[in-house]
Image (cartoon, grey):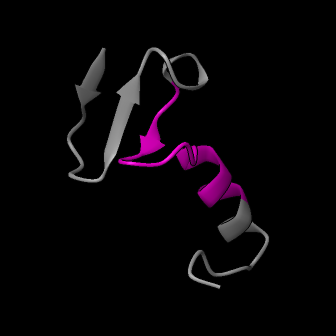
Amino acid sequence: MVQATEHLYIVRDDGILSGEPIIKGTRTPVRAIVETWRLGISPEG
C-alpha cells in the first residue's frame, strides 16, 4: 500500500524496500540521497 507523507515527492510503499521512504515513482530511497549529499555530492550530479 502506498502511503503519502508530508512531502509531495516522498512516499512509503510496503512492497518497495520494506516501506522505507522513497522518491515517488522510483525505487530510490531517501536515505541514499541524504548519504550522497553528506559526502558532498549533489543529488542532481
Which residue, as the protein is rendered here, is positioned at the far bottom? Answer: 45
Residue 32 forms part of the magenta stretch: yes
The residue at 74%/79% (across/down) is 40
Residue 35: x, y in percent?
A: 71, 56
The quarter of the rendered structure image containing the C terminus is bottom right
Q: Residue 37 sits in which quadrant? A: bottom right
Q: Report the number of numbered marks.
A: 0
| Residue name at image x 38 percent, y 28 percent | 12
On the image, which quarter does residue 13 sit in? top left
In the figure, is residue 17 to the left or right of 14? right
Q: Residue at x 26, y 24 (%)?
A: 3
In x, y percent, where is residue 22? 47, 41
- Residue 15 belongs to the span the image colors magenta: no
Q: Residue furthest right?
A: 39
Residue 33: quadrant of the picture: bottom right
Residue 41 lies, in percent from the top left, at 72, 79
Name the side, left or right, on which 24 lies relative to 40.
left
**Segment tinted magenta in the rendering:** 20-35
In the rendering, at what x and y percent does residue 25 appear? 38, 48
Q: Name the residue nearer the viewer: 15 or 6.
A: 15
Q: Is residue 23 above or below residue 41?
A: above
Q: Is residue 13 left or right of residue 9?
A: right
Looking at the rendered image, the quarter that the N terminus falls into is top left
Identify the residue at image location x=60%, y=25%. 17
